[in-house]
């Protein structure tokens, strides 16, 4: 798909979500926080759920955690507009509580479709709830900042789990770790692109 076709597909998906009366958390929320960014993004960031400001502005990561995410992206010279950002649930849970398994499951088909449309080279999970989508058995304290190749929907997907920026704001140790983990992303992206090129050239030589 071209970038324009991807944007149209995302717009259509958003309309579908807005009309879906079966989605949990909708009644208590102000807005659907669909996600935003480059429809042709190489990096896809998946957080946990909208907070107060996200619910008001209908945009992901616009509060304090969002400000930190912007700084982290700046540290690797990647404009926020060049990545795509969303959450495992797209309506705000009451009182910013953790999303429940059934709620995450209800939004899953839409998140899966976003990933399918965008086709990112790299998925960065922010927090344990989004990490659980790809690495259900992992402990974030053990795997943060590491690169995993997982079979997702039949395709080889590169996933880097990280702490949620909100956790970094509460802990100096986590802050240091998330900053260090972010600095690895350009190299991970480069390695992913190189391996894709190698596979592509190998396939061409077999033709």
Image (cartoon, rainbow, N blue to C red):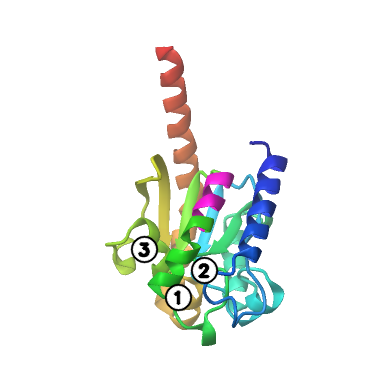
Of helix, strand and loop, which one carries label 3?
A: helix
Residue 141 lies left or right of residue 28; in this view the side is: left
Label whose residue precedes the other's in the sequence (1 or 2): 2
| Separation (CA) of disc 1 from disc 2 | 7 Å
Q: Earlier in the sequence, mark 3 or mark 1?
A: 1
Question: Residue 194 at x, y = what percent?
Answer: 46, 33
Q: Is residue 148 above or below residue 99?
A: above
**Would you name the residue on which mark 1 appears?**
99
Marks 3 and 1, how far apart at CA: 12 Å
Choose mark 3 or mark 1, whichever is in front.
1
- Residue at image point 70% right, 47% down: 8
Q: Nearer the viewer, residue 22 or 144?
A: 22
Image mark for residue 132: 3
Binning the other alpha carbons within 10 Å of mark 1 as few (below 14), some (14 to 19) or many (20 upward) gives: some
In this view, 147 is above or below 106: above
Q: Is residue 180 visible?
A: yes
Any part of residue 183 in sight: no
Q: Position of residue 20 (x, y in %)?
A: 60, 65
């Amino acid at each position: 798909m071209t970038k324009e076709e991807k944007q149209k597909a995302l717009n259509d998906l958003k309309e579908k979500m807005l009309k879906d009366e079966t989605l949990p958390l909708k009644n208590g929320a102000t807005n659907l926080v669909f996600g935003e960014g480059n429809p042709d993004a190489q990096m896809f960031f998946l957080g946990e759920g909208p907070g107060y400001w996200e619910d008001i502005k209908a945009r992901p990561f616009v509060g304090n955690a969002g400000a930190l995410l912007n700084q982290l992206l700046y540290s690797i010279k990647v404009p926020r507009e060049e990545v795509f950002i969303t959450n495992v649930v797209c309506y705000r849970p009451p009182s910013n509580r953790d999303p429940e398994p059934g709620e995450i499951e209800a939004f899953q088909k839409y998140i899966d479709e976003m990933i399918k449309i965008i086709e990112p080279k790299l998925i960065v999970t922010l927090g344990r709830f989004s990490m659980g989508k790809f690495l259900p058995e992992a402990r974030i304290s053990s795997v943060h900042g590491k690169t995993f190749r997982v079979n997702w929907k039949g395709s080889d997907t590169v996933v880097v789990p990280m702490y949620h920026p909100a956790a970094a704001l509460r802990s100096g140790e986590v802050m240091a770790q998330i900053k260090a983990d972010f600095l690895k992303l350009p190299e991970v992206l480069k390695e992913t692109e190189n391996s894709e090129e190698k596979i592509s050239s190998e396939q061409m030589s077999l033709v």
